[in-house]
Image (spheres, rainbow, N blue to C red):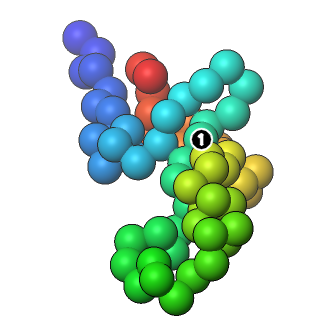
Amino acid sequence: MKLKLKTRKSAAKRVKVKKNCICRKKAYRGHFLRRKNSKRLRRLSQAASVHDSDFKTFTKMLLYI
């Protein structure tokens, strides 16, 4: 009997799997928001895709998603 592989829940909470990419949130949006201008905050609020070098790692962590 083969065991089922588990999804890494920490990775599943941080990313969203789309049709052709794995999307993540950008860093530096947590605090000290008054000193950052609105253009920068707008840019940081947009989703970013996981880098190509990390893509294989994330696909191993997110097996069934």
Residue 62 vertical position relative to residue 44 in the rendered view, above or below: above
- Where is residue 58 shown, x and y percent of the image? 54, 44
In the image, taking residue 19 as reference, residue 27 lies left or right, namely left
Q: Residue at x 50, y 34 (%)?
A: 16
| Side of 11 where 9 appears, left or right | left
Residue 60 appears in the figure: no
Q: Quadrant of the N terminus?
A: top left
Q: Is residue 43 visible?
A: yes
- Residue type at mark 1: give it: Cys
Give the residue displayed 62% in from the left and 69% down from the top.
38
- Report the residue at 62% width, 50% height from top: 46
Q: In the rendered view, would you say 41 is above or below 45?
A: below
Between residues 4 and 59, which one lies in front from this camera angle? 59
Q: Looking at the picture, does residue 19 appear above or below residue 26? A: above
Quadrant for the C terminus in the image: top left
Above or below residue 27? Residue 43 is above
Mark 1, residue position? 23
Q: How many marks overall?
A: 1
Which element is circle 1 on? strand
Q: Residues within 10 Å of mark 1 (few under 14, many from 20)?
A: some
In the picture, residue 62 is in which quadrant?
top left
Q: As drawn, which residue projects farthest toward the top?
A: 1
Residue drawn at x 32%, y 28% as measured from the top left: 5
Coordinates of residue 57 in the picture (x, y in percent):
57, 48
- Determine the image quadrant of residue 36: bottom right
Residue 34's spot in the image, x, y percent? Answer: 46, 83
Q: In this orientation, which residue lies closer to the viewer: 41 or 49?
A: 41
